Image (cartoon, rainbow, N blue to C red):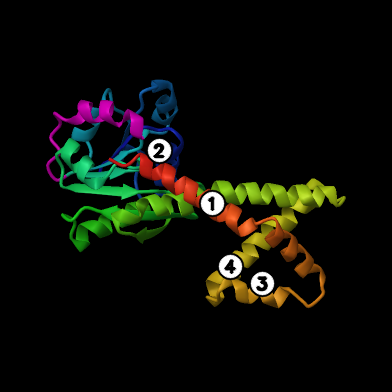
Amino acid sequence: MRIGIIGVGNIGKIILERLLISGKFSPEEIIIYNRTRSKAQKYEERGVKIAPDNKTLVEKSDVVFLCVKPQDSDAMFKQIEKADTQGKIFISTMVGVKISHISERTGSEYAVRIMPNVPAMIGKGITPTSFSEAFDQQVKERVIQILETLGKVVEVPEKHMAAVTSISGSGPAFVFVLIESLIDAGLRLGLSYDLSRELVIETLKGSAELLQVMGNHPGEFRHIVTSPAGTTIEGIYSLEREGIRGILMKAIYDTYKRAKQFER
């Protein structure tokens, strides 16, 4: 299977690295194109092929990842319009660019939208995925096998792509802000950076895994930790008084609205 990647910026680079690290695909099976050629050249030393243009990349690939910014998509589509796309699969990471638009501009009935997130860098991401109607289960499985190099794959209706973009796509940024704040709180209390960082990260990891394994509602475990007139309830009261739930929900909703603005 020959895989092409158009755009090796943040997302394209993660996909390329995971394909190579997984061992499922040889470098010779991968071809890339990037508008700034210097970003692609370093991969040539690792055996990855560099296409002279997007049209050539499409013609030499069976599966093509479209990893450009939405505002750059028109120029990209114009470059590949004349390519033979019969039977080729196009997988887009572009926020807001709908499957119908991708199929129309590429001329292929096999269009996929995905929204990987940053933990995909270590194969621990989650990738919400929407398929065009042309896919049968067998062809879907081929795509899923590729995407599993990034982590877990979850199929979602396309109408929910803006929502999952705000939760899992942008979500890590909000988590990193939370982690940074908790580490700084430890520093304020006199802990070293290294100790505070370790305590925060392991606490978050363990809490998330506990929820995943046990399946309980988060509120159940919060009440286990929160004793009457204890230390935790003071912190919970402070969070509620400052409106932590509303702040987080508004951040997600604002992100969602921005994702909807890109739709076409």
What is the secondary structure assignment of the residue under circle 3? Answer: helix
Instruction: Report the quarter where the C terminus lies.
Output: top left
Q: Identify the residue shown where x is 22% and y is 41%.
A: 101
What is the secondary structure assignment of the residue under circle 4? Answer: helix
Q: Identify the residue shown where x is 59% and y is 71%.
A: 218
Where is residue 88 drawn, in percent x and y?
Answer: 18, 43
Quote the CA–CA distance across marks 2 and 1.
Answer: 29 Å
* Mark toward the start of the polypeptide (2 vs 4): 2
Task: Please name the amino acid that badge 4 sits on.
Answer: Glu
Is label 2 in contact with label 1 (beta carbons under 8 Å)?
Answer: no
22 horizontally vs 54: left or right: right
Judged by depth in the image, the label closer to the viewer, 3 or 1, is 1
Judged by depth in the image, the label closer to the viewer, 4 or 1, is 1
Task: Give the labeled residue for mark 1.
Answer: 250
| Majority secondary structure in the magenta region | helix
The foreground one among 222 and 80 is 222
Residue 111 among those drawn in magenta: no
Task: Give the labeled residue for mark 3.
Answer: 222
Task: Give the labeled residue for mark 4.
Answer: 209
Q: Identify the residue shown where x is 35% and y is 49%.
A: 114
Residue 82 among those drawn in magenta: yes
Task: Give the labeled residue for mark 2.
Answer: 12
The foreground one among 113 and 198 is 113
Task: Please name the amino acid that badge 2 sits on.
Answer: Gly
